[in-house]
Amino acid sequence: MATVLKMNFWIFQGNPKVFDVDGYLMKYSILDWLVRQKQYGHMIHPGDPAFIWRAKGGMPGSGGIIAKGVILEDPELRDTDTPHTWYVPPEEPIELRVKIKIEEYRLDSFHGMVTKKELEVIPNLKENKIFHFYQATNFQLSQEEFNTIMDRWKKKSRR
């Protein structure tokens, strides 16, 4: 009998002070993202939806959801496939990473990114760890939190 895996929902954060988040999204449709919160390593699976969050990185108003995609594979230990995108290289060369296929990206408010400012006032989101643990890279969302962000993402589409 096949095991059915529960779908999980994710935010993967990138800090533009240490990593060229925007350039990475503009150049690649499949990203290789760090899974620094090791407790999530066994919970991230192919098919899980994922958002990419750009930290403000010293630029007020620039933080928030800038892309959406889907997990392509289970996380595995490997080196970065794009060392040129790092301003501050990772401490360890081999780290837990996951492939994310980007379906759409929006790098500014004009193009429909969903800002931190918009999200942090929504009652069912304001307690999410992304608003309290700025140094983390990976954040799990509840189904309700995912739906709320997805609704906001869809409403801001510039089609």
Image: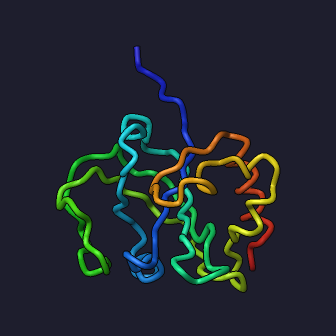
Can you give x and y, in whole percent of width and height, for residue 26 in the image?
A: 46, 81
* Image: 37 above or below 62: above
Q: In which quadrant of the rendered view does residue 66 lie?
A: bottom right
Q: Residue at the top extreme?
A: 1
* Image: 105 above or below 144: below
Q: Is residue 70 left or right of residue 158?
A: left
Q: Is residue 44 left or right of residue 95?
A: right
Please identify the quadrant where the C terminus is shown: bottom right
Q: In which quadrant of the rendered view does residue 80 lie?
A: bottom left
Toward the viewer: 5 or 125?
125
Can you give x and y, in whole percent of width and height, for residue 34 in the image?
A: 35, 57
Toward the viewer: 135 or 142?
135
Query: Which residue is drawn at the image coordinates 51% and 77% (left, top)?
Result: 57
Query: Which residue is drawn at the image coordinates 40% and 80% (left, top)?
Result: 20
Across the whole image, how many numbered discs are drawn on residues?
0
Query: Which residue is drawn at the image coordinates 50% and 54% (left, top)?
Result: 70
Query: Which residue is drawn at the image coordinates 68% and 40% (left, top)?
Result: 143
